[in-house]
Image (cartoon, rainbow, N blue to C red):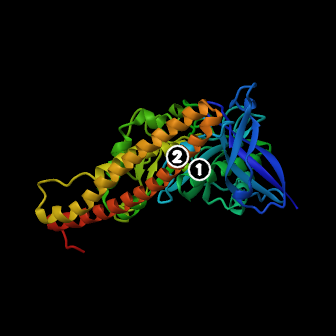
Amino acid sequence: MKSKLEYIWLDGYKPTQSLRSKTRVETDFGGTLEECPMWSFDGSSTLQASGDDSDCLLKPVAIFPDPDRASAYLVMTEVLNADGTPHESNGRATIDDDDADFWFGFEQEYFLWDTKTNLPPGFPASGYPGPQGPYYCSVGASNAHGRDVVEDHLDLCLEAGINVEGINAEVAAGQWEFQVFAKGAKRAGDETWVARYLLERTAERYGLAINWEPKPLGKELDWNGSGMHANFSNGIMRESGDEAVFNKICEEFGKNIERHIGVYGANNDQRLTGLHETQSIDMFSYGVSDRGASIRIPVGTVEDGWKGRLEDRRTASNADPYRWRQQLSRPLRRVWLKLASPVSIEAPAARVQPELFYVHRLQALSRVIQISDFILHCCGAQIRNLVQNASGNAIAPRRCTENIRLHCLAIRHILVSLLHVYTCHRVRLMTRLSSIYSGRGCAD
Ligand SMILES: [Mg+2]
């Protein structure tokens, strides 16, 4: 029995990477990730290596059945250098906090694109269709353009086990959206990229391409751009019930606008103009139900007693969800550390004592996590150094260093989970005690 394995990877083009893939035929393949062998490709043809040293490696990281081909699978891979280290184009390998406690929902907008007219379907060869208004969530041939592609894509994603949670026609003619939800940053990124791959391949059959640019019809015209609104939450956000947690996260995001925008997709300045339900690229704001804000606090989060998710509305349709997630790590880590800060000395002693129980543990955990970050940084630097000076003697210490790194990473994950649990308990306690000492309610 022969099986077709489609190895998918991201190329080295800048500023926006594209999807590449090639088929490998295996005999008696059982359908598991463990059975997928490492593979290689010509990196000089994808801007990932030079011609005189062109081999790059493909490391399988996720597998899905391929419902569009007989006896076939889709294999998402990471690109490695020939020595086994992550390639610089490998955004997935930059994620150092792949915690399933984090849930992600990406709202992927895109334009179907007619390669003959170089316009979306629904646009006449010259001029424009009627102005925006009737296209969003539309039905009927006058306003909904390209539904066949969109429906086929949805069916394929569901059959492949990709957790697409919905689709809709978008504000501009020929513009659509699908939504992916997953737990864990790497899984969310894998599913989003494979869904993008299936969309590109499905559209081929209809003679259409997918335009992932955030403003393909130009900045000046009154046509919406495409984003990838990124929703996220973790246990603390879903359970604490404290407005302050959400405000702190939003405020941290606002401190590093440029660093965030740097990985939110190329040409995003065309889209983030302050018009068409966006905030300006150089401004930051957040608000409940505010679709013109950088971060929207969904009304459901507030109505559920400040339990739920946030929506980062700045991410462009061509952003890499892996790199977006990694950029999220630093501000969130600062928030968790702030939540672990000591209680106010003005607080009543009866309030301070129970809270100190959590504060001491949170501070200790934070310090140990900082130490483990330092060890991970040193191990990474040593491995890179040994690889660069590769010799027979370097192999043994490299393995040893890699083992230390992996153990340290595992311990760090446990510590971060504990930190989240303690923070959550502390926030609940603070809310309860605030209620008691402000005389606004009872302990329940
Ligand atoms: Mg949308």
Q: Position of residue 82 (x, y in %)?
A: 69, 36
Task: Name the residue carrying label 2.
Answer: 95
- Badge 1 vs badge 2, beta-carbon distance below 8 Å: yes
Q: Position of residue 281 (x, y in %)?
A: 45, 34
Q: Quadrant of the N terminus?
A: bottom right
Q: Is residue 382 above or below residue 78?
A: above
Q: Is label 1 in a helix, a strand or a loop?
A: helix
User: Residue at 13% across / 58% down in the picture?
Assistant: 347
Instruction: Indicate yes or no: mark 1 CB to ligand 1 under 8 Å.
Output: no
Q: Nearer the viewer, residue 223 or 106?
A: 106
Q: Give the Cα distance between marks 1 and 2.
A: 10 Å
What residue type is disc 2 on? Answer: Ile
User: Residue at 66% across / 56% down in the picture?
Assistant: 139
Q: Nearer the viewer, residue 20 or 264?
A: 20
Q: Is residue 388 left or right of residue 4?
A: left
Q: Residue furthest right?
A: 1
Q: Nearer the viewer, residue 12 or 178?
A: 12
Residue 122 in view, yes or no: no
Q: Which of the 4 image quarters holds residue 254?
A: top left
Q: Residue furthest front?
A: 393
Binning the other alpha carbons within 10 Å of mark 2 as few (below 14), some (14 to 19) or many (20 upward) gives some
Task: Name the residue carrying label 1.
Answer: 189
User: Residue at 61% across / 55% down in the picture?
Assistant: 168
Q: Position of residue 248 (x, y in %)?
A: 32, 49
Q: Is residue 345 left or right of residue 342?
A: left
Q: Is residue 53 left or right of residue 234?
A: right
User: Residue at 21% across / 60% down in the picture?
Assistant: 356
